[in-house]
Image (cartoon, coloured by chain):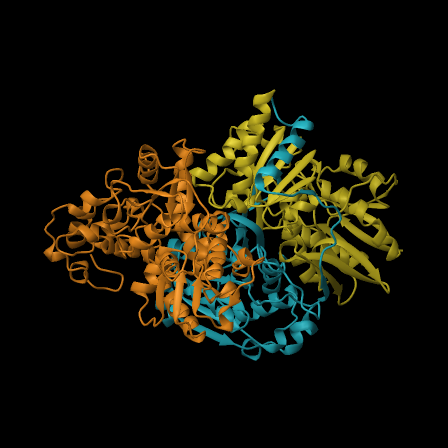
Amino acid sequence: METVEGESFGEKYDLFVCLQCGKCTGSCPLSMRSQLNPRKLVREALLLENEAVMDKDFLWDCTTCATCRLRCPRDLQPVEVIIGMRSILIEEAKVPSTVQEALESTFKNGNPWGRAPSKREEWAAELSIKKASEGAEYLYYVGCTPAYDPRVQSVAKSLVRLFDAAGVDFAILGNEEKCCGNEIRRMGEIGLFEMLMEDNIEMFENYGVERIVTTSPHCYNVFKNEYEGLKAEVFHYTQLLCDKLDEGKLKLTKELKKKVIYQDPCFLGKQNKVFEEPRKLLSSIPGVELLEYDREKMRSVCCEGGGGRMWAEATATGERTAETRVKEAAALGAEVIAVACPFCLLTFEDAVKMTGYEGKIEVKDISELLIEAIEG
Amino acid sequence: MKIVVCVKHVPDTAEADVVITPDKKGIKKEGLAFGINEWDEYALEEAILTKEKYGGEVVAITIGGKDSEDTLRRCLAKGADRAVRVEDPALEGSDAYALAKALGAVIKKEIPDYDIIFTGTQASDDGFAQVGQTLAETLGIPHAALVTKVEIQDGKAKIHRELEGGLEEVLEIQLPAVLAVQTGINEPRYVSIMGIRKAKKKELKVLNLSDVGLSPDEVGEKGSLLKLEELYVPPVEKMAEILTGAPEETAARLASILDEKGLIPK
Amino acid sequence: MAEVFVLVEHRRGEIRDITFEMLSGCRDVAKSLDASVTAVLLGKNVDNFVEQLKSWADKILVVEDDKLENFNAEAYQKVLSHLIKERNPVLTLIGHTSFGMDLAPALAAELGIPLATDCIGFEVKDGALIAIRQMYGGKVNARFSFKKSPYMATIRSAAFKAEELGLSAEVEKVPSPLTEEVTTKRFLEYVEAVVGEVDITQAERIVAIGRGVGDYSDEKVRSMIEELANELGAVIACSRPIVDKGWLPKDRQVGTSGKTVKPKLYLALGISGAFQHVAGMSASETIVAVNKDPKAPIFTVADYGIVDDLFKVVPALTEKIREIKGGS
């Protein structure tokens, strides 16, 4: 197979050293329920022509959680092979219509949700927040889902109040903010990703941004690891708030007597090794009893919200991983599943409804719990 | 076959607030996302499908400023072979009639041996629904609007037109003709940014009025038959009783209204 | 005396509503222009149409020809351009329908007459006609003036009310100017949209969805809507974008290019209310709209409105209806 840039998959991803041990497939949260088989795909990338990917609808099942990459004994990147194969589908216009719409909207509107760019800052209408043009220590990069999704807007609003309470000097881009491209690259739209990256870096530089704090681990990941030439320092909000907690500027005073379990977002936890800050924030809330999943941190299980899965209907059948996780949380006696990612919030809330735990288990973003701890 | 497709770069106002400019002749464009007119996207796809089936060349044409090249580049990336953009200050204030004249002049100059011309039935901004049909008249060829299916056979096309109430009519039309297509006629394909970049090599010609043999008097306000006097916010004649509150409250209120009216089956 | 021409639109043996709307709606503008109203009827065996039209116009101009049996824009254009040249009506009105959209622009261009399409009203200022039409999907109204008279305009469906006029028209038959068959465009047949299992025109309650529901192929979205429809005993209908995406069949589409419905309850979810849709549902007894955009035109036809996210409102509404049903 050849990548869309014309390199061989074997060379680009160094696939000749693959042992075909199958650890990637074994670790894949979808392989049990879908034809998605990273080991087999790596082999096919070496042996077959590009045409061979044309009918592989299951390529859209991958959540790009990257467990396959993290477990590979030869440090190979099966997840990147899958993204490379998706790129071939994109260039051949073999795209599910929902993915097509998300990509077209991102190009036209700067967000994958089909929403007007002029409505991006509507969530902040009743808050007084500085604009990046006024200058600030931190740029709060809100992200598309927190800006437009009514459920996740609550996270953005909570963060604004927390930043204010902790005395953080921050500003937002408002309607000028554009998609970060993390999901776009993972859907295989390399050209669009590069365009977003260039536009965003230019905008950050124009506003003299030195520090960026994000709502989503996905935006955090792409800024931190994939934005070539970005000079600004990047933080996930849990990192910034944890610092403020340590400095004594964020005071968690109100009691919250709840058993809380924390779901590590793949793009914050296993992919970026931010494990402690979210846990420290949660356990610092008076009254919170912090529970742990059996499979946590590096072994945590993806919620199935990443890698473009918010826009692609999976071919996978059977119980979704988020549903499994809700049941596990229930078995451990959790009353609240705490998340730190917009996609986890959405997938877990659905999963709670699907599994019949509505009214018994709540899904909350860490920021929402922190608000309760400062405001009661 | 020589296939022409006429496209328009338009602002998306489906969700955005529309603000009328102080001179009342236009709307504020800042903050609006622009792209290919929805009907034209289907027209473009139909043009490309026609080329893929019968061979030939697709030429995409637009009248508009430099920013409308975004739309032409997408046309080229999707499969148009070349593109022509006409820009001239004299075109300002043109009505549908004047625009059709200008399009006709470009086509006669650039693709005189055309076999079929696709347009969208209407544009989402002005909603005239008349440019394609008027263009046909200026070229002296037949046309059909609201086209939902096209099959080409020996210098003719068998087409479906959408009528009201879920009815369609089937017609046979002689080529060359202008077919103004309705949305839903096909499934427009995706084109990647890489595809758009690659298509940068394709020819995109920019012409002015004299290049296409038109005088400034034939277009713009002078060459138009209709003049926009002013835009205004539509008066609200009647307004629904808006239920306010949190979703649980509005839903509860609505449910009890429906119940009182006997609209909930029991 | 000057004349206003109103083109009679008919199909398969029936005069279409737009004809009566135009005949009735143009009286004021005809008066301001000092003109009488002439219904122009083209067709084959149209005697019963003539009878129906008598009380609606001052005059009926009839052109009968076998070649005019079915609507054909090319044939109509030839006849009308002949009539307009000969009689010089100050204003010609044609429906902004599939029929009129195909016919009017080329006819106006051939005659060099200014044409305003999709008009919803008129004003006469200093003896000159001003047309009112909408732009940007109905978010803005526009006044257009005509460079010269005579004028031509196409009229939006349901923009005017058809109100019985009680006139008694004089009938004038004119020989057909068509000498030969129109060969550039030939009518072959009508085809009906495939009828599915559900007939939305017969439903008492309709839950209608539009662009605002987002991706209706998403199982979660679909089941949320279906649950509400089930509780209400309603059928699911939609606006055009949902059909264009292939998410519901064409026979579920409400609007000018789909079905006209008059249910007891019409619950519009995420439908902005473009006129093409509204024309197909405005006669419903109780209309409820849920839409995020407070400026969505749907709220001007609805009886009750909720300005909120339908993904929040719909599950809550389903729940409340369940409670009401459970309690009875």
Front-most of residues A194 and C147? A194
Front-most of residues A88 and A178? A178
Q: Which chain is orange?
A: A
Q: Would you identify the image quadrant in which residue A228 lies?
A: bottom left
- Quadrant of the image containing the N terminus of chain C: bottom right
Left or right: A88, with B103 as reference point = left
Q: Who's the residue at 50% across and 50% down the image?
A: A375
Residue A322 horizontal/vertical position (percent)? 34, 40
Chain B tint in image: cyan
Residue C223 horizontal/vertical position (percent)? 46, 34
Front-most of residues C313 and B48? C313
Q: Who's the residue at 18% across and 47% down the image?
A: A24
Q: Would you identify the image quadrant in which residue C317 lies?
A: top right
Q: Which chain is yellow?
A: C
Residue A266 visible? The answer is: yes
Residue A112 visible? The answer is: no
- Look at the picture and state if B116 lies above or below B183: below
Left or right: A176, with A9 as reference point = right
Residue C298 horizontal/vertical position (percent)? 65, 46
